[in-house]
Image (cartoon, rainbow, N blue to C red):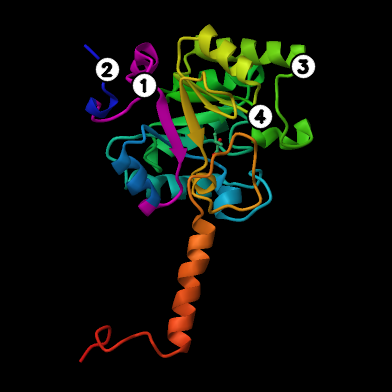
């Protein structure tokens, strides 16, 4: 029988594998607020990520580094309220898992207990395997994240494509396999050459979700405000803008400003008798 994703009443860490098996692409977007999450779930987006990108696209910071656990939990719990079908991923922010394994487990647990997330995402490759193992041992499903991992932006010297050098390519392939072996149920691959995205996707059985990793990943993810054109000045090669919300907000607010100044708003119909 043909696999129909709309027949899945709730996407979870187990049935996500069915997409890959059936060759049906997984759709994933970030969300940070209730109305957006409501719309994404309604339209049938399979996976919603409360990414630490909220620090940049929502809060206006220069990078994701200063995102805190409390911020992440707050936004995860807001998005959770909107979801009926989508799988909800909470993104472990910088320094929530790097220093101590027990701290990592406790922080991952907060995403499920306080944020209502279904699972967590952890950036990194071979070096984070022991920590992810502990999180998994606590019964918390984990999504890996390899390639351009933005929490390491200072080590990489910027937002650069990863995996062009043979040794980095090898490290990323080994990392992906190790993350699968210890029990991650999915893997985000960010900003790598398309042929590497394909190679990793074919090398592992868990579904890959790509962002700037070419068309052969098992699914795709974009930052919602980038897709909507709400963020300006950020134009990586992989980004397809589906709208121009920044302009639309300016237009609407500008018309409101004119109406109020002219005394045209509120009208009689918009006033109580
Ligand atoms: O934080 C985030 O939004 C992410 C995606 C870009 C994959 O990690």
Choose between 30 and 52: the one closer to the eye: 30
Q: Earlier in the sequence, mark 3 or mark 1?
A: 1
Query: Can you say which quadrant of the picture contains the C terminus?
Result: bottom left
Provide the residue span drawn in magenta.
8-35
Q: Earlier in the sequence, mark 2 or mark 4?
A: 2
Residue placed at 76% from the left, 31% from the top?
156
Q: Is residue 200 left or right of residue 186?
A: right
Cα gap from disc 3 to disc 4, whole angstroms: 13 Å
Crowding at label 4, few (<14), some or many (≥20) Cα neighbours within 10 Å? Answer: many
Residue that numbered label 3 is attached to? 165
Cα gap from disc 2 to disc 4, whole angstroms: 32 Å
**Rendered location of residue 146, percent (x, y):** 61, 23
Q: Earlier in the sequence, mark 1 or mark 2?
A: 2
Instruction: Tell me whether the residue at label 3 lies in contact with that at label 1, contact meaning CB atoms closer than 8 angstroms.
Output: no
Residue placed at 69% from the left, 50% from the top?
62
Residue placed at 49% from the left, 56% from the top?
245
Above or below, comparing residue 61 to residue 203 in the picture: below
Q: Is residue 32 left or right of residue 10?
A: right
Cα gap from disc 3 to disc 1, whole angstroms: 31 Å
- The answer to whether the residue bearing label 3 lies less than 8 angstroms from the nearest atom of ligand 1 is no
Q: Is residue 147 left or right of residue 272?
A: right
Instruction: Tell me whether the residue at label 1 lies in contact with that at label 2, contact meaning CB atoms closer than 8 angstroms.
Output: no
Front position among marks 2 and 4: 2
Residue that numbered label 1 is attached to? 16
Front position among marks 3 and 1: 3
Cα gap from disc 2 to disc 3, whole angstroms: 38 Å
Instruction: Tell me whether the residue at label 3 lies in contact with that at label 4, contact meaning CB atoms closer than 8 angstroms.
Output: no
Query: Can you say which quadrant of the picture contains the N terminus?
Result: top left
Residue that numbered label 2 is attached to? 3
| Residue 21 included in the magenta stretch of the image | yes
Residue placed at 36% from the left, 32% from the top?
46
Cα gap from disc 1 to disc 2, whole angstroms: 12 Å
């Amino acid at each position: 029988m043909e696999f129909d994703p709309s027949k899945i009443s709730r996407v979870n860490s187990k049935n996500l594998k069915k997409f890959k098996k059936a060759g049906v692409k997984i759709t994933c977007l970030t969300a940070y607020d209730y109305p957006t999450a409501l719309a994404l779930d309604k339209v049938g987006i399979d996976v919603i990520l409360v990414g630490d990108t909220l620090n940049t696209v929502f809060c206006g910071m220069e990078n994701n580094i200063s995102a805190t656990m409390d911020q992440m939990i707050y936004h995860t719990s807001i998005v959770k309220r909107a979801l009926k079908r989508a799988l909800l991923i909470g993104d472990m922010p910088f320094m929530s898992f790097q220093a101590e394994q027990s701290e990592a487990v406790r922080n991952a647990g907060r995403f499920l207990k306080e944020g209502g997330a279904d699972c967590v995402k952890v950036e990194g490759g071979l070096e984070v395997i022991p920590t992810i193992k502990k999180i998994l041992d606590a019964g918390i499903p984990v999504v890996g994240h390899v390639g351009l991992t933005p929490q390491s932006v200072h080590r990489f010297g910027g937002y650069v494509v990863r995996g062009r050098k043979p040794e980095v390519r090898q490290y990323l392939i080994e990392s992906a396999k190790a993350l699968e072996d210890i029990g991650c149920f999915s893997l985000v691959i960010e900003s790598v050459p398309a042929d590497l995205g394909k190679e990793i996707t074919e090398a592992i059985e868990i579904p890959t979700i790509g962002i700037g990793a070419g068309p052969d990943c098992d699914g795709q993810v974009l930052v919602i405000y980038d897709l909507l054109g709400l963020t300006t000045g950020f134009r990586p090669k992989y980004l397809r803008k589906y709208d121009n919300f920044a302009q639309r907000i300016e237009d609407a607010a500008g018309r409101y400003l004119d109406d109020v100044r002219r005394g045209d708003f509120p009208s009689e119909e918009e006033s109580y008798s």
